[in-house]
Image (cartoon, rainbow, N blue to C red):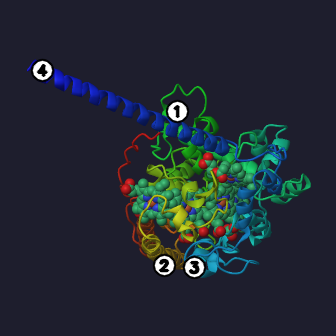
């Protein structure tokens, strides 16, 4: 037994030595490989961290993108492509490069809805970022007096705000609504900042980190943070609410990089009000949902104490709320937002240039770039992805067109009642219902994804629009019949969603 065991012991020792030697060899090889890999990763990280040699100095007042382009030619080259025409079934623009198509001609019910407002004169397809300033300067809506606030989202306006505020951009912003568009636009050009959205609007010139600069957005997102609305699309807001809140929520300090990849776009792609009566306002004090914004506007008063509205409908006299491109708000209610998928993931997808990644600054419809915009996460074929989007958009378009018919029927019914002698008092319910229906219909019509950013939320809103328009039509048709006040309270809406699971 001893013999056997000692033989086995010797044999085992022999095996152990061999194993040990092998192990040492393996470890040596592996550690060499790991070291190599680490060095490689380190080098790539270094490359990625400083993927440029700074050839010229740029600062927050450098608004000419061409100058930034000397340091970051890849991003600049793709930024320049925003001057190219883009077109998909619902996205980009029709018409010529001289003039994009009129939306109000494609969908005449839009024109009917906007009677009494400049949007009934000229309302066109959007196009690339390169055009934002000229398209604003040239719209026939400018034949009506407009405020300097319009520049907030259409130009490299920050140096002008600093100038107006004696160095303080927020102060300058708050003064800017008092200027006419013409005067402020002239000042912008005179100062040499007559450019569309520029690099410094989204990047810290020292570090190239993402930043938000637009005062309207900063005030707006601070109001969201102070509200008690759930914000699953922005976990940093939930985290800030856990603090003692002695310092206001600061997107540039508190937000994660993922959030910043949407916030930079939310500086402009949001609902707003601007006029010469008060500073530009984003209606977010109760949260981003359609009815939270509606409630905000409903509680708002003009400085003279009058009830807030965007315009009085030229035919019916209803005090209407006009919705404008609520992309950030609709996105915030969808599954992509809950999953931490940002605007830039789809609209500025990464490409590679050797070891460095380059974000596509040709901001456009992701359907023109499905392989990079969607297939980084979704493994279906390009055809299948296209079909899924088209299904969502077709359904949304069908409901939207039904809504358009319903709103026209409602307006006609009110007009008929007026002809029969109905007074505004007798039409109170019908006019209130027009305000509610139009706000909902416009919220989805003015949103630019044709329902894609949050398909079910879009359908829910359109369903309510249809209901209120038909209720309003009924109220107008039966104006002679006295009745208890129509239930003005909104139909019970879906319960609030639970917060999204925590993300890094
Ligand atoms: C999951 C991908 C995805 C995310 C995230 C996303 N979008 Fe979109 N977006 C789309 C798709 C798809 C369309 C529809 C494009 C079309 O019809 O051609 C669209 C349309 C648009 C359009 C109109 C495009 C055009 O060509 O006319 C704008 C503007 C827009 N999105 C802005 C935003 C903003 C701002 C955010 C973030 C708040 C955002 N999107 C988040 C996928 C996305
Ligand atoms: C300074 C304001 C501003 C910022 C910031 C901004 N946009 Fe825009 N965007 C606009 C305006 C204005 C237009 C319409 C320009 C026109 O029609 O002349 C536009 C147009 C677009 C279009 C339509 C492009 C086309 O070819 O039809 C898309 C898509 C878009 N923006 C997405 C985004 C995304 C995504 C971000 C964030 C990465 C973003 N925008 C940031 C103001 C802005
Ligand atoms: C909060 C940001 C913001 C403000 C303020 C703003 N815009 Fe825009 N504007 C946008 C965005 C985003 C788009 C592109 C999306 C779209 O067309 O719906 C756009 C598109 C446009 C377009 C091209 C499409 C169209 O509507 O014909 C014109 C013209 C325009 N704006 C004029 C104005 C005028 C005039 C004002 C001031 C009354 C103004 N904008 C204020 C963000 C803004
Ligand atoms: C509307 C906002 C916006 C504007 C305007 C903008 N960028 Fe960016 N940029 C982004 C976003 C979003 C990223 C991705 C950053 C991230 O994920 O950290 C980015 C990334 C970058 C990066 C880092 C490397 C990369 O490509 O991801 C550089 C460099 C850069 N941009 C340069 C520029 C230059 C130069 C301009 C002007 C010609 C410009 N950017 C204009 C939003 C913008
Ligand atoms: C960064 C990752 C990512 C990118 C990029 C992305 N998605 Fe998604 N997408 C998701 C996640 C996560 C979900 C949620 C489904 C889940 O959790 O299984 C989702 C859900 C969807 C859904 C079903 C839900 C809905 O809203 O109807 C569609 C359709 C969809 N994506 C289309 C697209 C398209 C089209 C693009 C490109 C324009 C795109 N996605 C880009 C991650 C992504």
Residue at numbered disc 4: 3
At 12% from the left edge and 24% from the top edge, which residue is drawn?
Answer: 4
Along the viewing direction, whichever of 333 and 486 lies nearer the viewer:
333
Which of the numbered marks, if any, corresponds to residue 405?
A: 2
Mark 2 CB near ligand 3 (8 Å cut) = no
Whole-angstrom CA distance, mark 1 to mark 3, is 44 Å
Which quadrant of the render holds ligand 3? bottom right
Which of the numbered marks, if any, corresponds to residue 107?
A: 3
Q: Where is residue 243 in the image (x, y as percent from the top left)?
A: 51, 27
Mark 4 neighbour class, 10 Å CA radius: few under 14, some 14 to 19, many 20 or more:
few
At 40% from the left edge and 43% from the top edge, which residue is drawn?
Answer: 499
Q: Position of residue 304 (x, y in %)?
A: 69, 48
Mark 3 neighbour class, 10 Å CA radius: few under 14, some 14 to 19, many 20 or more:
few
Q: Which of marks 2 and 3 is in front?
A: 3
Mark 1 neighbour class, 10 Å CA radius: few under 14, some 14 to 19, many 20 or more:
some
User: Of marks 4 and 2, which one's residue comes earlier in the chain?
Assistant: 4
Residue at numbered disc 1: 240
Quadrant in the rendering for residue 145:
bottom right
């Amino acid at each position: 037994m001893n013999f056997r065991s000692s033989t086995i012991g010797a044999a085992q020792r022999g095996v152990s030595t061999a194993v040990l030697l092998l192990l040492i060899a393996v470890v040596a090889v592996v550690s060499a490989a790991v070291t190599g890999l680490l060095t490689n990763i380190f080098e790539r990280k270094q490359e990625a961290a400083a993927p440029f040699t700074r050839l010229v100095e740029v600062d927050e007042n450098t608004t000419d993108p061409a100058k930034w382009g000397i340091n970051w030619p890849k991003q600049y080259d793709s930024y320049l492509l925003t001057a190219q025409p883009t077109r998909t079934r619902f996205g980009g623009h029709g018409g010529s490069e001289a003039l994009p198509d009129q939306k109000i001609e494609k969908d005449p019910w839009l024109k009917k809805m906007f009677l009494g407002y400049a949007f009934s004169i000229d309302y066109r397809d959007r196009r690339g970022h390169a055009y934002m300033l000229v398209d604003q300067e040239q719209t026939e809506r400018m034949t009506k007096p407009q405020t300097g606030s319009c520049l907030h989202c259409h130009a490299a306006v920050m140096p002008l705000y600093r100038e107006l505020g004696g160095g303080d951009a927020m102060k300058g912003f708050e003064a800017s609504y008092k200027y006419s568009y013409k005067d402020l636009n002239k000042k912008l050009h005179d100062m040499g900042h007559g450019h569309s959205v520029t690099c410094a609007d989204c990047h810290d010139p020292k570090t190239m980190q993402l930043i938000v600069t637009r005062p309207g957005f900063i005030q707006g997102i601070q109001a969201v943070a102070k509200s008690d609305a759930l914000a699953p699309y922005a976990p940093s807001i939930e985290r800030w609410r856990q603090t003692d809140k002695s310092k206001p929520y600061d997107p540039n300090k508190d937000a994660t990089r993922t959030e910043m990849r949407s916030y930079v776009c939310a500086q402009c792609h949001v609902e707003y009000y601007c006029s010469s009566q008060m500073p530009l306002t984003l209606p977010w004090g109760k949260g981003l949902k359609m009815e939270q914004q509606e409630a905000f506007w409903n509680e708002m008063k003009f400085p003279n104490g009058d009830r807030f509205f965007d315009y009085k409908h030229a035919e019916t006299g209803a005090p209407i709320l006009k919705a404008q491109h609520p992309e950030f708000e609709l996105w915030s209610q969808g599954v992509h937002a809950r999953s931490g998928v940002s605007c830039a993931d789809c609209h500025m997808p990464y490409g590679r240039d050797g070891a460095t990644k380059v974000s596509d600054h040709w901001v456009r419809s992701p359907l023109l770039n499905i392989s990079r915009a969607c297939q980084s996460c979704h493994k279906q074929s390009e055809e299948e992805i296209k079909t899924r989007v088209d299904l969502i958009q077709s359904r949304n378009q069908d409901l939207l067109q039904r809504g358009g018919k319903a709103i026209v029927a409602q307006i006609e019914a009110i007009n008929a009642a007026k002809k029969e002698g109905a007074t505004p008092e007798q039409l109170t319910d019908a006019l209130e219902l027009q305000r509610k229906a139009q706000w909902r219909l416009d919220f989805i019509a003015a949103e630019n994804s044709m329902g894609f950013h949050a398909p079910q939320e879009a359908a829910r809103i359109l369903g309510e629009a249809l209901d209120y328009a038909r209720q309003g039509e009924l109220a107008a048709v039966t104006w002679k019949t006295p009745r208890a006040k129509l239930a003005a309270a909104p139909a019970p809406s879906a319960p609030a969603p639970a917060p999204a699971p925590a993300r890094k």
